[in-house]
Each structure stands twice: as structure tokens, then as C-alpha cells.
Amino acid sequence: MNIAVTDDLPGEREKITRILSEYAAKNHMEIAVSEYGCAEDFLSDYRPLLYSAVFLDIYMEGMNGIEAAQKIRETDKDTIIIFLTTSEEYMPDAFRLHAYEYIVKPVRREDLFSVMDDILEKTTPVSSPAFSFPGQDGDVSVFYDDLVYVETDAHNYLQILDRKERGFLTRMTFAAAGRLLLQDKRFLLVRRGVIVNMAYIQSFDDRLLKLTVGSPVPINPRNRRNLEQIWDNYLVDRIRSDILRGGLS
């Protein structure tokens, strides 16, 4: 799990990182923490889906945490944002930006552990299927939700990219991968040897399919209209499903 901590006080960053390390050790998991001393530095590195959670101090010199969160929400509606502050003055603004939590300083170990428990429950795809394949160092599994694309290369390896931009190589055949992935409606065969998760499509032009993660994928211009229509239908279906889930909750 990748987490960003942005606070202009080094002691606060160190304290949060230490508590997160304790949480990781207690729960036998790996947490990588990236620390930033200002919102500007954080935003210069930020890209959608890079972090599972973002801890943002509200009161910082220069750009404050609320302004940074507004920038995040321009491109990423889903990243979990937890605000850190010494006052509850900005609470309405925080929740208008769909903040996940609002922690009042000084940060307590029990508060941070509780938030992490909630985040872990929210982000663990318990029922999500996984794509399993033999990797170079043993068997690997990537949840369908995290799988961006699979592609054959010139040496008949299957290249796999996940949402954290980690690349994997396997000798699994493309046909075998296709039999598994193309049964799931989120995956699209965009050209021979390339399957893309439509959740990560950003846009189309005549010759390229642009993704929110990774490099653009070349496509046949003659197939662009059909591919774009399938993607449009996928987006409509996903919106409909989200509405139904919201109505049943």
C-alpha cells in the first residue's frame, strides 16, 4: 500500500510515518510512505491511482491542504484523503471534497490505527477476481481491479501492467490470458495481442488509446469508432451500477 503524508512540520511527518510503520508490522503488511513538506512538492509528484491514501495537513505555508485536495479531485475522484489539522474550522470544506476522515492534531496512535483499519477494509477487494500467472520469481496474482493491460511482446512474453505501474513478464500465452480476462466485461481487446481494462481508459484519438496509467496504446484507426462505443457503453453501465448500489445502501 502506497501512502503520501504531506505536512510542513518534519516532526509531524516522522510521527505519522512511524505510526504507519507500526501498523504495517502489526498487520503483517507492506506500507510505503512518501513524505512531503509542502503541497506544491506533493502535487508535482502526484498522479491518479498512485496512492491508496493521502494524509494532508490543512494549515501549511503556501498552498494549504484544502487547495491541494481540490487539485487532486480535478483528476481523481476516488483517492482516499485524510485531513490533518489543529482546528475543525475547515471541516465543511473537507467533506465537500469527499474527505475520508478528518483527524485533529496531535495525531494519536489509536486514531490513526482506527482510520487505517477502515481504509484497509474499504480498499481490500475481497470479492474481486484475480489474474494469476507464473512470474519470473514464482506465481503472481493481480486483482482485476488493479490490472491495467496485458500485451504480447516480440519475444512471445506476456507483459502485464498494474495500476501502480509495476510491470510483470510471464510465459503464459495471450490466448490463455484472453480466455480468462475477456469473460469479464471490463476488459477490451483493443487490437491483436493487447487487452485493456476499460476502467483505465482516458480518451481516444485516431491512432492512440490514452490511459490514466502507463503509455498510450496504438490502435487501428478503422476500429476506433467501435472501440469508443464499447467504452461508452461500459461507462454508462458502470454509472448505472453505481446508482443502483447507492439506492440499495
Image: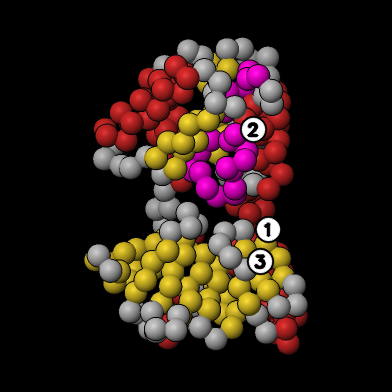
Cβ atoms under marks 1 and 3 closer than 8 Å: no
Sequence-wise, the earlier of marks 1 and 3 is: 3
Q: Quadrant of residue 112?
A: top left
Q: Position of residue 52 (x, y in %)?
A: 49, 43
Number of the label disc, if any, that sits on residue 239? 1
Q: Quadrant of residue 167?
A: bottom left
> In the image, is residue 104 above or below residue 245?
above
Q: Position of residue 110 (x, y in %)?
A: 38, 20
Mark 1 vs mark 2: give the one in front: 2
Whether residue 101 is visible here, answered yes or no, is no
Mark 2 lies on a secondary structure that is helix
- In the picture of the structure, the residue carrying the numbered disc 2 is 40
Measured Cα–Cα span from mark 3 to mark 2: 26 Å
Mark 3 vs mark 2: give the one in front: 2
Residue nearest the viewer, comparing 14 with 75? 14
Whether residue 76 is visible here, answered yes or no, is yes
Number of the label disc, if any, that sits on residue 210? 3
Mark 1 lies on a secondary structure that is helix
* Residue span colored magenta: 41-61
Residue appearing at x 39%, y 53% in the figure: 126
Q: Position of residue 188 (x, y in %)?
A: 57, 76
Residue nearest the viewer, comparing 204 with 77? 204
> In the image, is residue 83 above or below residue 125?
above
Residue nearest the viewer, comparing 124 with 167? 167
**Quarter of the figure that contains the C terminus:** top right
Q: Quadrant of residue 6?
A: top right
